[in-house]
Amino acid sequence: MDIVVMARALFGTSLGFHIIYATIGVGLPVMIIIAEVLYFIKKDPDYALMAKRWTKGFAILLAVSIASGTIVGVMISLLFPDFMEIVGQVIALPFQMEIFAFLIEAVFMSIYLYAADRLPPTLRFISIISVALGATASAILITDVHAWMNTPAGFNISPNGEITDVDTWAAFFNPSFGVTAIHVTLSAYMTVAFLIASIAALRLMKSKISDKERAYHKKALTIALYFGAIMSLGTAINGHETAQMLHEYNPRKLAAAEGLFETQSYAPLSVGGYTSLEDQRVKYAIEIPYGLSFLAGDRFDTEVMGLNEWPEELWPPLYVHVLFNVMVGIGSVLILIAFASLFWKHVLKRDFPGWMLAILVTSGPLAMLAIETGWCFSCIGRQPWTITDVLRTGEAATKSKSVGFLFYLFISLYVTLLFVTAFVLRFYFKRNPVSKDLKTQ
């Protein structure tokens, strides 16, 4: 396999593995805050128990997140040295700030984890809110570098390749920073909400649980559905803003996402299907008339640039249309699941039947799949550039021939860590079931 392809595969696999833990690390502290607030308002010990048990799971996952995040940092330095040379001169600030964000998260996580039972309510809130702020800030700061790669700003390159006129803050607040940071944050919150909904629904499907335990899981499911509904709707609205950002700053990526070859007004939105290079259209898609033009500019007559405006060697891989559709499709399904479930519960005032619980069980894995495909679309849709229109991936990648060995080595490591994490979580919560904690309340 080509060295550049292998380097991309190794880094992409490393990032894809880390995203699982990083996403949970961003969203779970917010769910813990919600449980703490409800306990403070309602004085219901079930909510305090939720916060306690979710914190135990968070602590286990955080350890792997730290390790995998360190690996990702090392990987990008070793696999793309020419890229890091530019990063060090232009966009190093978010990396430096992220260290302090992580420090805040780690310190207050230790306080909350080991001393929550001995802290007064005010200090409990301060601790867990600091954890959530640190985790979210850490994700946003790292995402800022990714946003800058898509819409680089804050520097110039001289004819001899020298970086000049560096403006650190212009690079930091690059054109896609705002929408990208919001999208990553909301989607992480959404994903964790649906993961908790999945677990609660799975427990409710068991017939042999006590009424007290059933009530506990119903409360957890209700929290998750409300939060998941709000965050999924927010993610969709932000997705519309992201499409408008792409239309203005990276129209090539938007054209690839929708399989649009010819520049046109009243451009249709293609749902489903796959992009055919030979036919220069999306085959087997459902077309929504004028949908893409409206998505791009809030007007049906907005002119959207097609791929044929650029040489073919500068096109992103055409399969990004499928990735984009999977991401958007899952997001739409999750909105439907959340609001339909809340309607069933609070308007029709019915308990969830088995078939609906089974659907809710799938919501967490679907949300995580949307996160993974979303990151794949964002990164692959930038190709063949590492820094859009500045540095090609082939120029940025390492020339070392040992990448293949590292690829198989780290794939084995990630698979092992996934199994170990699952084993430790299952072992801990099997030895400490919620039924046991409910009896001691």
Image (cartoon, rainbow, N blue to C red):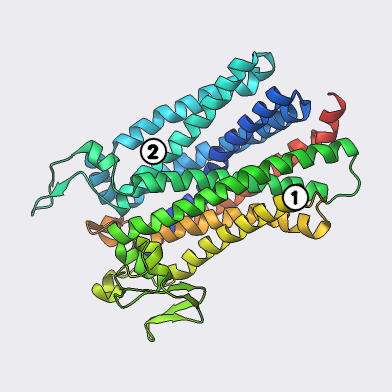
Q: Mark 1 points at which residue?
A: 347
Q: At label 1, which amino acid type do we have? A: Val
Q: Looking at the image, can residue 53 be seen?
A: yes
One can see residue 406 in this view: no
Looking at the picture, which amino acid does disc 2 mark?
Answer: Leu
Cα distance in 3D space between marks 2 and 1? 41 Å
Residue 380 image point, x, y percent: 39, 62
| Of the pair 242 and 59, the residue shown nearer to us | 242
Give the quadrant of the N terminus.
bottom left
Question: Residue 141, which numbered label?
Answer: 2
Number of numbered discs visible in the structure rendering: 2
The image quadrant of residue 111 is top right
Q: What element carries label 1?
A: helix
For the point 29% across and 40% down, which residue is it? Answer: 172
Whether residue 268 is situated above or below residue 16 in the rendered picture: below
Q: In which quarter of the image is residue 313?
A: bottom left
Percent of width and height locating residue 168: 23, 37
Determine the secondary structure under disc 2: helix
Q: Which of marks 2 and 1 is nearer the N terminus?
A: 2
**Left/right of residue 315 with respect to residue 259 in the rendered view:** left
Is residue 36 depicted above or below 184 in this figure? above
| Residue 438 % position (x, y) | 84, 30
Please provide percent x and percent y for residue 162. 12, 47
Which quadrant: the C terminus?
Answer: top right
Q: Is residue 281 left or right of residue 312?
A: right
In the rendered view, tell whether residue 90 sits above or below residue 399: above
How dense is the environment of label 2, judged by Cα within 10 Å: few (below 14), some, or many (20 and up)? Answer: many
